Image (cartoon, rainbow, N blue to C red):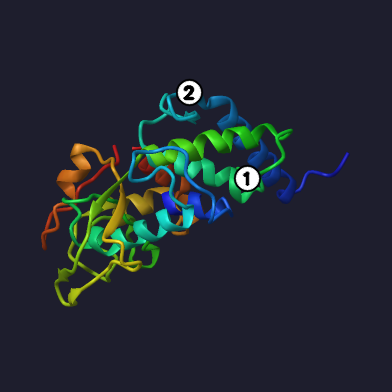
Amino acid sequence: MRDKTLQIEVNVAIDEGLWALHKGMTRFSDSQSDKGDWQTWSGYGAVIAANVNAFEVNGHLEQGDSANPYVETVQRGIRRLFDYLASTAISTQTYPDIGTVNPDSNGNGQAIYVNQISTSIRAACSWTPLSPVVRLTS
Amino acid sequence: MFMDAIIASGTPDKLTTSGNSDISGRKYRDIVQDMWTATPTVNMTMGTIGALALRLEPGAGQLGLSVGSHRPDPGGTRVGLDRAEVGQTGKSDLAGLQPTLGRLVRL
């Protein structure tokens, strides 16, 4: 048995975290494919993105070995991610202090965004100088 | 964060098999590029498209979520911890504030 070290403790924490994510995923199928998310933990799509990223940066990829149980979790999660995206037409934009620019880097006239934001955050996002501090902490 | 997850897949030419008709069937790399296209717009017109920018400012005595623009000192709405809350942790480094940030992110 190895001595207890910080690095080992870190690795154990990562392993336990990924296992918790794997077990905690809500799995379902729709007309497109098998998917999964963590809606029972949080309804925000960014949670899926963060959790999928946690698996990926630790080597558990969508294209990985099917014998790896985390691969299926990543596959479901990344499919679910795309459900949260929407597109909108985009053209030249005029920004304060910058002027008019065309942000459409590939020229297809489309921009894709995450089609989810809470009402309270949307209200806080109205971009006005001198807007007040909004505290989310309890 | 969405772009991070898609990029970290390491399969830029893979085709999406989910999402609405504007999303499904497109390459991952094209999705990310169009998300990047949206980014400057999001920075300036949060109310229209909507996004949340994260900016950590421990050196300024303020650590938190910044909403409104990636530009320095945009005057946008700021959601975060003030100096007093940083002081409560007894630490000024990011690691010491992770539990508090975790609560913020979950919200």
Q: In the image shown, does B46 or A105 lie closer to the viewer? A: A105
The residue that disc 1 covers is A61
Which picture quadrant has residue A4? top right
Q: Which element type, helix, strand or loop, lies under badge 2?
A: strand
Q: Position of residue B48 (x, y in %)?
A: 16, 51
Which class describes the residues within 10 Å of circle 2: few (<14), some (14-19), or many (20+)? few
Task: Specify which label sits upstream in the sequence, 2 or 1.
Answer: 2
Q: Which element type, helix, strand or loop, lies under badge 1?
A: loop
Q: In the rendered view, tell whether residue B7 sits above or below residue A120.
A: below
Given the image, on which type of amino acid does mark 1 rest? Leu
Position of B45 with respect to A63 (left or right) is left
Q: Quadrant of the N terminus of chain A?
A: top right
Q: Which of the two marks, 2 or 1, is nearer to us in this view?
A: 2
Q: Chain of mark 1?
A: A
Residue drawn at the location 19% of the way across and 77% of the way down: A98
Q: Chain of mark 2?
A: A
Position of B27 with respect to B65 (left or right) is right
Which numbered circle lies on residue A29? 2
Q: Position of residue A10 (x, y in %)?
A: 67, 46
Which picture quadrant has residue B61? bottom left
Given the image, on which type of amino acid does mark 2 rest? Ser
Residue drawn at the location 30% of the way across and 50% of the way down: A113
CA distance separating discs 2 and 1:
20 Å
Residue drawn at the location 29% of the way across and 56% of the way down: A111
Residue drawn at the location 24% of the way across and 49% of the way down: B50
